């Protein structure tokens, strides 16, 4: 079976899974995966059997919110927003390595009764087949509460989802990943609204300078910038502009990570420890 045939088979399996669900409530962030799942669910089941739900808190990036709203308006995806209270949970704000477990527990505790109230049979997330290779305590919260992962069940990788998203005409097909703002804080540094606002303001400043795929990591009075490898030379030559943009936000030092941005960088020490 060729690569194209394999992708078609995975797509067909996803459609089979969705039809078997009958109706679905999707935890919807506006990222590549949840957008593709939500739009595909509407294609397969019809809009009356789908609800995409976005959990809003100070940890949710505004740039992601704008994308999430643009997609549901453009593709006719039923959508609603709910407030989540993970920042009221001291287990979350202490920022342990399993921080995401408490966030997802909070989200699913809201979505499960909402789905039942709306008569939707399945609650699902946008996890894909690649996610098994990273440290994801949030996935444990999903398993404990019976959350389905149709993309992962169908064997769809991030690359597959980007390819199928482009074919479907989804503008998110090449969108950089945009996880919650808390992921920019190293484990053990307390998650506070002020620090989240600093991160968001810093990333918006870097975005205005023309960088596309990057992270600003919060290290107390220092900001560490990771940019995609193909933008690293430009970031080096624009060091003064980057520092000048971030220092007024409250960072006394602005550092450039010479290894560049890579997915799962926050978890690298944990993965290495697990492997040793």
Image (cartoon, rainbow, N blue to C red):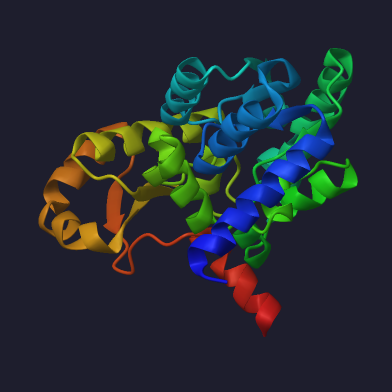
Which quadrant of the rendered structure holds the N terminus? bottom right
Q: Residue 250, located in which quarter of the rendered image? A: top left
Residue 55 picture location, percent across and down: 65, 25
In this orientation, does residue 187 appear? no
Judged left or right of residue 119, residue 127 is left
Between 167 and 259, the one lying in front of the other is 167
Between 231 and 253, the one lying in front of the other is 231
Q: Residue 78, located in which quarter of the rendered image? A: top right
Which quadrant of the rendered structure holds the C terminus? bottom right
Between 255 and 181, the one lying in front of the other is 181
Say which residue appears at 46% left-offset and 46% top-offset: 177
Between 7 and 271, the one lying in front of the other is 7
Say which residue appears at 55% left-offset and 38% top-offset: 36
Residue 191 picture location, percent across and down: 59, 39
Judged left or right of residue 195, residue 42 is right
Residue 255 picture location, percent across and down: 29, 57
In this orientation, does residue 22 appear? yes
Judged left or right of residue 17, residue 43 is left
Q: How many marks?
A: 0
């Amino acid at each position: 079976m060729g690569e194209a045939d394999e992708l078609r088979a995975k797509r067909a399996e996803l459609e089979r899974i969705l039809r078997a669900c009958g109706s679905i409530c999707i935890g919807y962030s506006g990222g590549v995966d949840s957008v593709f799942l939500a739009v595909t669910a509407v294609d397969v089941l019809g809009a009356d059997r789908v609800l995409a739900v976005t959990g809003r808190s100070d940890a949710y990036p505004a740039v992601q919110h704008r994308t999430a709203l643009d997609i549901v308006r453009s593709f006719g995806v039923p959508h609603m927003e709910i407030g989540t209270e993970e920042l009221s949970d001291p287990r979350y704000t202490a920022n342990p390595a399993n921080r995401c477990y408490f966030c997802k527990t909070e989200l699913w505790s809201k979505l499960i009764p909402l789905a039942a109230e709306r008569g939707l049979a399945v609650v699902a997330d946008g996890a894909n087949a690649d996610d098994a290779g990273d440290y994801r305590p949030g996935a444990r919260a999903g398993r404990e509460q019976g959350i389905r992962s149709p993309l992962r069940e169908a064997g769809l990788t991030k690359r597959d989802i980007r390819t199928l998203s482009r074919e479907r005409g989804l503008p998110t097909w090449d969108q950089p990943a945009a996880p919650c703002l808390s992921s920019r804080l190293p484990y053990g540094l307390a998650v506070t609204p002020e620090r989240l606002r600093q991160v968001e303001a810093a990333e918006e400043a870097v975005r205005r300078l023309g960088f596309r795929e990057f992270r600003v990591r919060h290290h107390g009075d220092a900001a560490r910038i990771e940019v995609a490898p193909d933008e690293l030379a430009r970031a080096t030559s624009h060091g003064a502009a980057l520092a000048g943009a971030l220092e007024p936000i409250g960072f006394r030092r602005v550092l450039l990570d010479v290894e560049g941005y890579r997915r799962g960088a926050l978890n690298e020490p944990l993965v290495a420890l697990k492997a040793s």
